[in-house]
Image (tube, helix red, strand yellow):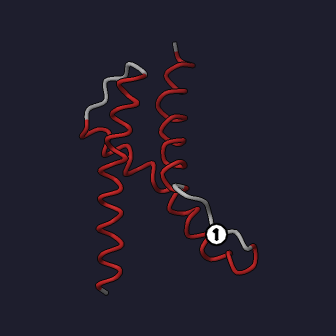
């Protein structure tokens, strides 16, 4: 149980860093995203990365693919980019 607890704490720290990245990218793309909104966005966007990580871990015996470094982070930032920044570019 302690190991699972530590894994979830690591994910929360990971989300804090992702929220900073979302906030930083919001500044670059001239979006009004504060840290609180960046945390909410990253919390919702990390779900795809976590599902892919679970699928990779479950199928790694058969596929010999164990993922790549920063896979969850890259997928999360890709989801944020597609949903927030590309969506606003096409509306204007």
- Pick whichever, 89 or 60, lies toward us: 60
Residue under label 1: 66
Q: Position of residue 5 (x, y in %)?
A: 29, 77
The residue under the point 37% across, 51% down is 43
From the viewer's perspective, is 24 left or right of 90?
Answer: left
Q: How many marks?
A: 1
Judge whether 62 appears above or below 76 on screen: below
x 46%, y 31%: residue: 84
> Which type of secondary structure does the marked residue at label 1 adopt?
loop
**Residue, x 30% and y 75% (percent of image)?**
6
In-image side of 72 versus 35 (left or right): right
User: The N terminus appears in which quarter of the rendering?
Assistant: bottom left
62 sits to left or right of 25: right
Position of residue 36 in the picture relative to residue 88 (left or right)? left
* Residue 48 in view (yes/no): no
Work out which residue is located at the far top of the displayed protein and give it.
92
Depth check: 70 or 88 in front? 70
Structural crowding at the residue carrying mark 1, measured as other residues with C-alpha within 10 Å and reported as few (<14), some (14–19) or many (≥20): some
Q: Is residue 63 above or below residue 39?
A: below
Evaluate whether residue 58 shows in this view. Answer: yes
Q: Nearer the viewer, residue 11 or 69?
A: 69
In the current view of this chain or complex, which residue is farthest to the right?
63
User: Closest to the observer: 90 or 46?
Assistant: 46
Which residue occupies 35% across, 24% down? 27
Percent x, y of residue 11: 36, 63
Image spot of residue 75 (x, y percent): 54, 49
* Furthest-front residue in this view: 69
């Amino acid at each position: 149980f302690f190991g699972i607890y530590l894994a979830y704490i690591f994910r929360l720290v990971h989300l804090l860093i992702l929220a900073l990245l979302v906030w930083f990218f919001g500044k670059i793309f001239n979006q009004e995203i504060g840290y609180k909104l960046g945390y909410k966005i990253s919390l919702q966007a990390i779900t795809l990365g976590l599902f892919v990580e679970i699928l990779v871990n479950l199928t790694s015996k058969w596929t010999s693919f164990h993922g790549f470094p920063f896979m969850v982070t890259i997928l999360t930032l890709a989801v944020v980019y597609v949903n927030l920044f590309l969506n606003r570019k096409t509306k204007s």
